[in-house]
Image: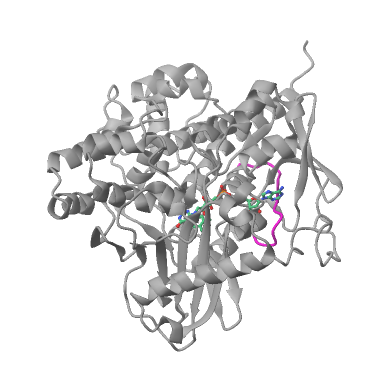
């Protein structure tokens, strides 16, 4: 996956978890939870979904790294490099 | 709930030994065994089943659901035990970890009322309405109220738990016993919170409720649990009732399964939904932990227990609309230990109108109080029967103020006490809401003491109630999934060492 695809991968996961949120205008460097309504259970879901879709493990002590989209790309980049993008909510 | 009949508890100890072995269909080995089918155990099992793990769920009772339960009585009566109200978050939890169908049954209560010597009011139990009431009815400053709500909302797990509810109330509303009552009484009934507990525990639960009000489940607990069982089976979870787990087996510092009905069922991981103290001190045993941890667990305080009085209304009779949830007290002032008083003056009434079970025309009223195990535990049989009768009588007297004709239309009346709750869930001292704050850490860290051993269930005040327990099940399921995947990977890794 490229960096752009990783952003798409994250947005797709968020779209499944929070179907009512508008994700088009999400800023890369602003905390996700300051832009859309995400609570700690939502973050847990993102982590579980990353594991389910891509086999990527995010240990609890690294959850902070996923606070912004940019953080996600930086942290997940190496882990997702060789993986193919999976889209469910944002398909088509 | 009459506790004389013990025959549901598996083959060994009842009056009526089971003719069939409830574990006959169990296989010898699972990825995960879940002990207990409270909302935490059920939800964890469902999540892990849906992720493809081979899960068995063992419940000592014949019903699944734990405290989320119901019972039927002659005359067509159905009583829900813990379906009084939960925060809106349950909607998301059910949609995500159960099914859209289950989530679609969640509806907001139409009415919440307070009636005590300090104030009488109806509220939607939301931040907006509480703000209005605090400002107009209680004369608080709007800015102070906003600051109070923001403070509670901003609290986090890792904040200092030494700030107590009392400290926090005194900071924002000094000397206002009436306001303290409004703010704490409902949460005390929801999860046993007291003025002495950390503000953080109270704040999380209070903020959850205040976000959108109080919700309930249309169809009743029986419908819910039936759908949950369908969902679990669809996800491949094997369900066994009437199976009381006697022991969790540990070999070389790893959980390896459970002993139940004289059989050893093996598993790569074990998740206990039994009380955390009982899990560690009895089901596993202190010999498997380091002494400092055992001391920490021994020191965990349990939450209070409950009493309830179930009042079934005769077929064809009705109760006029009053409210759904009524917090009532004849006590002049609020203080939190008094909520647990033996034959105290405060109780909540839940009114169940036909809307709760669409298609049914029946009404029921359930009264609940918080209670101390110690007041009920020591009574001999005669005194126990007498005190139960007194509980029923006190309840009817209080209820007559709202439903004057109650004695004429009540068809079935029955009481439950801390002994009843202890009997049905095997929770130590009949604890209704798990443990105080300090139970959270040992519960969360269990797997760092014994590989593959997990706990999910009411602990730390915040992880109790329907929503807290269900979400804690998911939080623990996430850890179990990580563990099982790592274990599977290790098993399949080529021998390169
Ligand atoms: C009177 C009352 C009213 C309540 N009202 C509300 C309310 O209105 N709203 C709300 O949100 N919450 C309410 N609650 C709290 C809520 O019901 C509980 O917090 C929640 O259901 C607890 O779920 P749990 O997963 O922690 O475990 P529990 O429901 O306690 O379940 C544990 C399960 O484990 C089983 N078990 C224990 N030991 C073993 C063993 N050795 N082998 C096999 N099985 C075992 C038990 O039988 C039980 O089924 C109420 C509780 C009570 C008592």
From the image, which quarter does the N terminus of chain B lie in?
bottom right
Answer left or right for B387 relative to A73: right
Answer left or right for B6 relative to B321: right
Residue B323 x/y as whole percent: 32, 69
Residue B410 x/y as whole percent: 48, 82
The colouring scheme, among rainbow, by chain, secondary structure or one colour, is: one colour
Residue B345, relative to residue A49: is it above or below?
A: below
Residue B47, relative to residue B331: is it above or below?
A: above
User: Which residue is drawn at the image coordinates 58% and 50% (left, top)?
Assistant: B374
State which quadrant residue B205 falls in.
top left
Q: Is residue B18 visible?
A: yes
For the residue pair A5 and B86, the one nearer the viewer reads as B86
The answer to if B398 sits in the magenta stretch is no
Q: Give the main secondary structure of the magenta stretch.
A: loop
Q: Is residue B65 visible?
A: no
User: Which residue is drawn at the image coordinates 67% and 57% (left, top)?
Assistant: B423
For the residue pair B417 and A66, the one nearer the viewer reads as B417
Magenta span covers which residues? B51-65
Residue B103, relative to residue B391: is it above or below?
A: above
For the residue pair B421 and A32, the one nearer the viewer reads as B421
Residue B261 x/y as whole percent: 83, 51
């Amino acid at each position: 996956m490229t960096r752009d695809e990783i952003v798409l991968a994250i947005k797709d996961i968020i779209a499944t978890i929070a179907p009512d949120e508008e994700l088009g205008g999400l800023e890369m460097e602003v905390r996700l939870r300051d832009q859309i309504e995400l609570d700690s259970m939502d973050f847990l879901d993102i982590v579980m979904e990353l594991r389910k879709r891509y086999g990527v493990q995010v240990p609890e002590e690294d959850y902070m790294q996923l606070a912004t989209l940019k953080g996600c790309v930086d942290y997940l980049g190496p882990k997702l490099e060789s993986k193919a993008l999976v889209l469910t909510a944002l398909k088509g | 709930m009459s506790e004389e009949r013990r025959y549901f508890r598996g083959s060994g100890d009842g009056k009526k030994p089971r003719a069939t072995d409830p574990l006959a269909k169990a296989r010898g080995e699972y990825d995960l065994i879940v002990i207990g089918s409270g909302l935490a155990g059920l939800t964890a099992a469902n999540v892990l089943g849906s992720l493809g793990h081979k899960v068995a769920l063992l419940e000592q009772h014949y019903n699944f659901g734990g405290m989320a339960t119901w019972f039927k009585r002659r005359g067509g009566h159905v009583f829900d035990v813990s379906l009084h109200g939960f925060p809106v978050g349950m909607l998301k939890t059910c949609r995500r970890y159960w099914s859209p169908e289950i989530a679609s049954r969640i509806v907001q209560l139409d009415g919440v009322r307070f009636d005590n010597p300090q104030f009488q009011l109806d509220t939607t139990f939301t931040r907006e309405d509480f703000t209005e009431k605090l400002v107009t009815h209680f004369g608080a400053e709007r800015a102070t109220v906003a600051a109070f709500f923001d403070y509670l909302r901003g609290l986090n797990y890792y904040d200092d738990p030494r700030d107590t509810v009392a400290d926090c109330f005194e900071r924002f509303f000094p000397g206002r016993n009436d306001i303290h009552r409004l703010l704490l009484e409902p949460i005390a009934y929801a999860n046993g919170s007291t003025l002495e507990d950390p503000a953080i525990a109270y704040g999380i639960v209070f903020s959850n409720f205040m976000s959108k009000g109080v919700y309930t489940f249309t169809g009743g607990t029986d419908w819910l649990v039936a759908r949950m069982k369908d969902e679990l089976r669809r996800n491949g979870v094997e369900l066994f009732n009437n199976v009381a787990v006697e022991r969790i087996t540990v070999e070389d510092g790893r959980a390896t399964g459970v002993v139940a009905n004289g059989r050893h069922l093996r598993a790569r991981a074990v998740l206990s939904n039994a009380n955390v103290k009982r899990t560690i001190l009895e089901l596993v045993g202190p010999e498997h932990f380091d002494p400092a941890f055992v001391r920490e667990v021994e020191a965990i305080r349990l939450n209070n227990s409950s009493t309830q009085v179930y009042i079934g209304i005769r077929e064809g009779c009705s109760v006029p609309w009053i409210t759904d949830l009524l917090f009532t007290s004849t006590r002049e002032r609020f203080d939190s230990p008094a909520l647990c008083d033996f034959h105290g003056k405060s109780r909540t009434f839940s009114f169940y109108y036909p809307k709760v079970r669409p298609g049914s025309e029946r009404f029921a009223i359930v009264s609940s109080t918080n209670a101390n195990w110690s007041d009920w535990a020591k009574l001999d049989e005669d005194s126990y029967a007498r005190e139960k009768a007194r509980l029923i009588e006190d309840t009817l007297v209080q209820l007559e103020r709202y439903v004057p004709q109650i004695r004429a239309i009540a068809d079935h009346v029955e009481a439950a006490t801390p002994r009843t709750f202890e009997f049905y869930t095997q929770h130590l001292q009949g604890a209704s809401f798990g443990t105080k704050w300090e139970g959270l850490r040992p519960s969360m860290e269990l797997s760092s003491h014994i590989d593959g051993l997990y706990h999910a269930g009411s602990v730390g005040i915040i992880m109790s109630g329907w929503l807290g327990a269900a979400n804690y099940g998911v939080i623990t399921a996430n850890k179990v999934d990580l563990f099982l995947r790592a274990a599977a990977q290790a098993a399949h890794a080529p021998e390169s060492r």
